Image (cartoon, grey):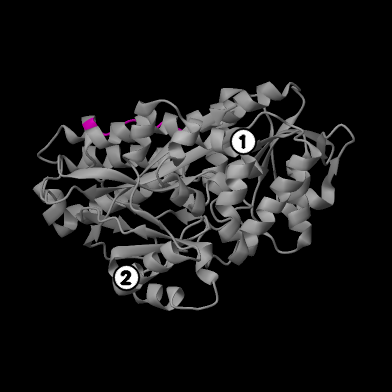
């Protein structure tokens, strides 16, 4: 364990050989992305990866798996409570147009009558290790997992992430570390197969063998390979299931909602609409895209996720759930409640009023203790440090679009980060985030 925190210090020639082998493995096994600056939409390079797997205590790893089933049930139950979603998101919608527009679609389809009662959720709950007070030096016993967020839409990297596990096993075997049991300890990663089977199960429940799965994608998608791995997993699970890819604009232009609420796109009836887009305002270039989202939600297609599931994944709902008695509103099993609550970090409201004022003041005075989180998915949206003071000091009521979260402090480890345009690979400080996928069909 000390070597993982202090460094392996691999000799230069051996390191160069390992990196070359790892890069070749990544390219040969589809651990690929399209670079942001790629001159062509079909120019791929290997995704960034660490040369070795990051250590994670087995007890915490298993805890994340066990509690995921509880979160699956909780997400589904919240999605069916209109009044809770409306009241909980009211303050966020006052300052955040994106959340407001999503809720408007939810409200509209609810009033019209939900055409498809079956919901499919491919969720991913993300955690980091956080020190138990005074015990940071004990890696195995001195930490607990705290939830960063739960993703209810476009939960990515189940595809190429499965292959990264095999890459780490391959590198570890070639490294021949003195601890030859590390390879045996690397857990299997069946995320791609599990997610594919979830979509196939939903397709079967739709009840039309000629209908297809629609993957809703972004224009110029950079993470296409991750999506393709899932598509191939669907095909392996059931070769009869066909997958088509369309952007929101293409759905609006070429999709037709029949009188019986069947959705037909380019002559193909849609059984399952699986979203890998629609989670960020950048996906809605015009009202055409919003119209497409409403069309999908009105249809009989099984949505992954429904608009209600997407709203459950907002940071505001995460914060409200941490309040006393809220999880208990949806779950009556005290053991399930305890497992869920054990993963909660400190979460605080920034609503207008005395409590929000107190929490904002606390963050302004101690910005390094907190993270300010907007109602967004996709990464890169959180606010840290001095910027917290700037955001929360405004007197325009804009703070209600955010929630305040206590900063998690995971252990700092040493690893080698391998990137395409990085010739010199050095041992660097890294932290580990642990994601657990869950499937719910209700």
The stretch of residues the image draws in magenta is 185-192
Image: 315 above or below 241: below
Q: 415 or 121: nearer the eye?
A: 121
According to the picture, the residue beneath numbered tag 1 turns out to be 80
**Residue 12 appears left or right of 307:** left
Question: Element type at marker 1?
Answer: loop
Write the residue at 33% across / 50% down: 345
Can you say which quadrant of the picture contains the N terminus? Answer: top left
- Residue 269 at x, y = what percent? 79, 33
Write the residue at 43% across / 53% down: 47
- Residue 281 at x, y = what percent? 63, 61
Image: 368 above or below 301: below
Can you say which quadrant of the picture contains the C terminus? Answer: top right
Measure the C-alpha gap from mark 1 to mark 2.
Answer: 36 Å
Residue 187 sits inside the magenta stretch: yes
Image: 28 above or below 96: above
According to the picture, the residue beneath numbered tag 2 turns out to be 367
Q: 158 or 172: nearer the eye?
A: 158
The answer to which of marks 1 and 2 sits earlier in the sequence is: 1
**Residue 198 appears left or right of 319:** right
Write the residue at 33% across / 68% down: 362
Question: Element type at marker 2?
Answer: helix
| Residue 310 seen in the current view | no
The majority secondary structure of the magenta stretch comes to loop
- Residue 322 at x, y = what percent? 40, 46
**Residue 132 appears left or right of 241:** left
């Amino acid at each position: 364990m000390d070597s993982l925190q202090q460094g392996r210090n691999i000799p230069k020639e051996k390191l160069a050989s390992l990196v070359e082998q790892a890069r070749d493995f990544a390219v040969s096994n589809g651990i690929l992305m399209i670079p942001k600056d790629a001159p062509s939409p079909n120019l791929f390079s290997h995704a960034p990866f660490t040369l070795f797997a990051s250590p994670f205590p087995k007890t915490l790893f298993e805890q994340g798996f066990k509690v995921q089933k509880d979160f699956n049930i909780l997400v589904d139950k919240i999605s069916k409570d209109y009044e809770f979603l409306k009241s909980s998101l009211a303050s966020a919608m006052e300052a955040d147009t994106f959340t407001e527009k999503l809720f408007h679609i939810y409200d509209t389809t609810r009033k019209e009558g939900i055409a498809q009662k079956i919901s499919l959720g491919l969720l991913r709950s993300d955690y980091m290790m956080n020190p138990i007070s005074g015990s940071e030096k004990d890696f195995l016993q001195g930490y607990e997992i705290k939830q960063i967020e739960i993703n209810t839409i476009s939960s990515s990297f189940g595809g190429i992430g499965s292959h990264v596990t095999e890459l780490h096993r391959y590198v570890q075997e070639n490294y021949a570390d003195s601890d030859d049991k590390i390879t045996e300890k690397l857990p299997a990663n069946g995320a791609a197969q599990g997610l594919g089977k979830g979509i196939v199960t939903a397709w079967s429940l739709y009840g039309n063998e000629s209908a297809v799965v629609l993957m809703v994608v972004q224009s110029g998608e950079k993470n296409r390979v991750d999506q393709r791995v899932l598509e191939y997993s669907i095909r392996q699970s059931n070769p009869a299931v066909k997958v088509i890819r369309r952007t929101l604009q293409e759905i609006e232009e070429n999709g037709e909602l029949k009188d019986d609420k069947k959705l037909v796109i380019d002559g193909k009836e849609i059984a399952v609409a699986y979203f890998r887009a629609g989670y960020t305002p950048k996906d809605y270039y015009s009202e055409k895209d919003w119209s497409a989202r409403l069309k999908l939600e009105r249809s009989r297609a099984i949505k992954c996720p429904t608009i209600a599931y997407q709203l459950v994944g907002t940071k505001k709902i995460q914060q409200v759930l941490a309040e006393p008695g809220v999880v208990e509103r949806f779950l009556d099993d005290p053991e399930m409640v305890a497992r869920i609550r054990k993963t909660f970090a400190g979460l605080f409201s920034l609503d207008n009023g005395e409590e929000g004022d107190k929490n904002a003041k606390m963050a302004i005075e101690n910005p390094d203790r907190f993270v300010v989180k907007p109602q967004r998915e996709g990464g890169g949206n959180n606010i840290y440090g001095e910027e917290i003071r700037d955001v929360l000091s405004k007197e325009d009521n804009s703070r209600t679009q955010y929630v305040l979260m206590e900063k998690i402090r995971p252990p700092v480890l040493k690893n080698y980060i391998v990137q395409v345009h990085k010739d010199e690979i050095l041992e660097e400080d890294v932290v580990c985030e642990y994601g657990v996928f869950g499937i719910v069909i209700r």
